[in-house]
Structure formats: C-alpha cells, structure tokens
Amino acid sequence: MSQSTRGSDEAVSVGFRTRWLTDERFRFMAQVGVEDVFVDVLSPGYEADAYPDDIDATDARHLELSPDSVPSVERLVELREVFADHDLRFAGIHSLHYGMYGDVMFDREGREKQIEAIQTLLRRLGEAGIDTLGYQWNPRGVVPMRTETDAEVRGGALATRWDESELGEVGTPPGELERTGTEAECWDNYEGFLAAVLPVAEEAGVEMALHPTDPPVYEEIGGVPRLFRNVESFERALSAVPSDAHGLKLCLGCFSQMGEDVPAVVRKFGDDIVFVHFRDVVGTVPRFTETFLDEGNFDPFEAMTALQEVGFTGPVLLDHVPHVEGDTAWRHRSRAYGAGYLRCLIDACRRQ
C-alpha cells in the first residue's frame, strides 16, 4: 500500500473525532491545535454509547448515514467548507456503524443493499475530496466494549475499564443475530465485502481503514466470531484482497490491550497505517483500564518515534480520554490536555 500523506506539510497531525459539528466545537478544536477532524456519523435509532457527548440533540449540525440515506456530494462539500472556514480539514468518516455492514458480516438479506450504499458513499467521498473511510467489523449489542465507565485513574479522574470477571454469562447472540456462522464463514463474508468495495475505493481515491475488535484477543463472545483480534488477523485482512486503498486505523490502545509491543506493531505495519488512535491502557485482556497517555503500558515517545521512522504522515487521534474535574460530558478539558501532549510528542520527535 502506498504511504498516506495527510496532515499539514506532510507531517504527523493531531486529529479529533466528533459527532456534532457545531461552530463552538470547531473553534475549540482549532484553539487546541487540532488540524484533522473525523466525523462520527449519526445512524437512525442512535443511542448514546459509553463515550457520551454534552450535546444531546439531533438538531445540532451532524451527518446521517444509513443504507437508505447516503450523504450527497453537495452535503459533503458543504461540510468540508465549514471545516475549512475554521482552519480544519474534514479528514474522513471515522467509522461505518453496524447498520451499514451487519447484513454483509453475516450474509443476510440486505447484504447487497449495504454493499451498494458503501460503494455509493465511497464515490461521493471521492467526489467531495474527502479521502478516508474508517470501519470496523464488530457486531454491536453482543457484549459491551467496557464493563465499567467510571473507574478511577490518576487523581480521581474517571475512565473506562474492561474486566472479564464482571461480564457475567454472555449467553446467546441477540435476536437480530439469528445466524452468525463459523469463523471461516465470517472470513469468507469479509473477503467478499473487500472484493466488492475496494475496487470502488481505488477508483474514488479513498482509503478504507480497518479498526481492531475491542476488546481484542477473544476468538468469540456470545457465539459471535471476533475476527480482528490480533496481529495475524490484520496481516490476513491486508493480504486477502491487496489494494492501495486498504489499510489500518491503527488503534495503539487495542494493541496495548493485546499485550503487544506497540512500537514494534507500528514498525510492522508501517506503510499500511492510514490514521492512528493514540491512546493507552493499564493492564491487558482480561482486565485493563483506559488512562492518560503518560500512564499507560507503552512509552508514548517511543511509539511516536516509531511512527516517524516508518514515514507516517497522517493524523493521530486521542479517541477516548478520561473525565477530569470540572469536565463536560465530551471531556473538553481532557481532550485539550491530550491534544497538547500529542503536539509536544510530535514536535519532540521532529527535533531528534
């Protein structure tokens, strides 16, 4: 895969993700040094997840996506220009939600409709000059991403935790997953998906970026195979349908949760990194807690140095952050701290 060249002056840039696209939020991002912004699309029937927002209203500016409603080129260009007015770049769609790929994942009725919607989205993103589409391959509702949302970390800040012992009996898959299939069948479905969408992505000039299953390591939970759980699975994903339009949303936190040597993972995947989730945890599966960047398992300076060594020039995103004293639900204070930390890391590595 050819190396991505995102960010200003072909350098690593600080990125944020957001669902709500308000002028106030854009001003905040620009003020703390963010350059690239990824949009969390709003899906029909949206429910708050473990990472809440302080804006609790769908009348705020946002971007909706479903198999029945793909944003127009005009809408995407309009939003791109709003970003530019605040000296920000509309870097891409952060992730496809489960309603856009669940039928493909399990080869159900509706598969073709979802594939066609993703193909349409890729074409429209390309026409609008937006070059990244993140995605995951993980069914929602089978198991929570975390078992606790208010675990105490440094100074009493609150963060999320996964503890397998607190999960209880997962049982059978939810009702909508009447048939999940074996791991081999799920791989077949996934590779068929890649064969259908990657040629369109190549033609559109859009890179698709795959995120790990979170929590990783487990072969299955609730009877549902979890494909992207380790390094080997990502090697298989990238080689299944080789394409310059396919790479990784490299979540350093997930690989840290696996117990991997994070800088080594960065060096291993090098040119296949599209953008990065730069976060960390304390502990590994079966029990870990998200925390501040300077208190996790891996050395953040070594990880950023590895990104520099492989020639990565894209955005690094905080993704999840702890909730600090006096913070908002979206965690403005903690995100400002994290953005400053990332900017210092980037600058320090550049000066080596």
Image: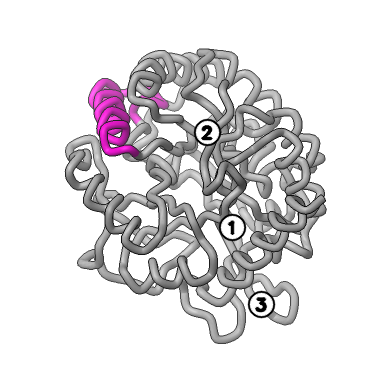
Query: Which mark sits nearer the N-terminus, 2 or 3?
Result: 3
Residue name at image x 25 percent, y 24 percent: 116
> Residue 103 or 331: which is nearer the viewer?
331
Image location (x, y in percent) of residue 276: 60, 44
**Residue with the mark numbered 1:** 318
The residues bearing labels 2 and 3 have C-alpha atoms spaced at a distance of 30 Å
- Relative to 296, is 209 on the left or the right? left
Q: CA distance from mark 1 to mark 3?
A: 16 Å
Quarter of the view holding residue 76: top left
Residue 15, percent from left and from top: 52, 54
On whether residue 172 falls in the magenta region, the answer is no
The label number, if any, that marks residue 157 in the structure image? 3
State the scheme by which the image is colored.
one colour
Q: Which residues are magenta?
A: 103-129
Q: On screen, 24 above or below 40?
A: below
Local packing at callout 2 (Cα closer than 10 Å; few below 14, some 14-19, many 20+) is: many
Q: Give the main secondary structure of the magenta stretch.
A: helix
- As shown in the figure, which amino acid type bears the numbered disc 2? Leu
Indicate which disc residue 210 carries: 2
Does the residue at mark 1 contact the one at mark 3 (Cβ under 8 Å)? no
Q: Are marks 2 and 3 in contact (CB under 8 Å)?
A: no
CA separation in Å, label 2 and label 1: 17 Å
Amino acid at dot 1: Leu
